[in-house]
Every structure is written in C-alpha cells, then in structure tokens.
Image: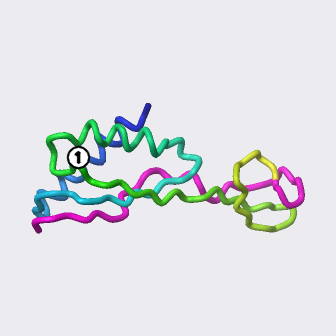
Amino acid sequence: MHELSLVQSLLEILEEQARKTPFEKVNSLLLSFGRLSCIDPQALEFAFSVQSRGTRAEGAVLRFDIRPVTIYCLGCEKELSPPSFTGDCPACGGVEVLLTGGTEEMKLIEMEVDGC
C-alpha cells in the first residue's frame, strides 16, 4: 500500500509550505494523478485520515483529478482515450501504440487553507 508513503510525503510538503507562507489549517486539497499510476483513491483517503490526525491537515477534504489513459496509434494516427489500456489500438487493432497519458504521478494542484 504505497498510499501511506504518498500521504507522508504530502504532509511533509504541507508543513514545508506552512513554513514559507504560514497558515493554520488545511481545508481541502486537489490532487492529480494518472489512472495507470496504481493509486487507489479510497486507500489514499483512508491513509490521509489516519496520518493527518493532530496536524494542520486533519479533517481536510481530498479531491481528485484522475487523468485518463491516452494513447497514440502509429498505425491509424489517432489519439484515443480508451477506458483501459490493453496494448493495442481500439480503433484499428494495431499494436504500435504510444502511451501518452494516464501514468502521471501524484501532484498537489491546489490547497485551500485558513489563517494566512
């Protein structure tokens, strides 16, 4: 469950940000990651609820921007966003495809805070 280490890193980033621009409480966080990054949003929420206890992020709402899988087929020259990645092009069946999206690691996009 790598969500635990992701949350630990996230909390460290929040504390570092609070040292730069002091704030009292985190109300919400917008996190972005790719569908193929193997991040389970429910596991991330659970890990966050446990690990954020006693911190300025306790009780913060997590929002997710899950980036879709996108591929580019060299055969039919189409860029597609299939519901899952099987290694072939859903349009022409070709196997010469490039994975162009959906693998992004987790990024903190936005945070709403009180007490600036």
Q: Residues within 10 Å of mark 1 (few under 14, many from 20)?
A: few
The answer to whether 14 appears left or right of 103 in the picture is left
- Residue 49 occupies which quadrant of the picture? top left
Describe the colour scheme in one phrase.
rainbow
Dot 1: what SS?
A: helix
The answer to whether 37 appears left or right of 25 in the picture is right
Q: Which residues are magenta?
A: 89-116
Q: Is residue 40 above or below residue 18?
A: above
The answer to whether 63 appears left or right of 28 in the picture is right
The residue depicted at 44 percent of the width and 57 percent of the height is 64
Q: Is residue 87 covered in magenta?
A: no
The residue depicted at 28 percent of the width and 63 percent of the height is 111
Q: Which residue is mark 1?
A: 12
- Residue 34 image point, x, y percent: 54, 53
Q: Quadrant of the N terminus?
A: top left
Front position in the image: 8 or 24: 24
The answer to whether 37 appears left or right of 76 in the picture is left
- Amino acid at dot 1: Glu
Q: Is residue 100 above or below residue 9?
A: below
- Residue 61 occupies which quadrant of the picture? bottom left
- Residue 54 image point, x, y percent: 14, 41
- Residue 19 image point, x, y percent: 11, 57
- Residue 10 image point, x, y percent: 30, 48
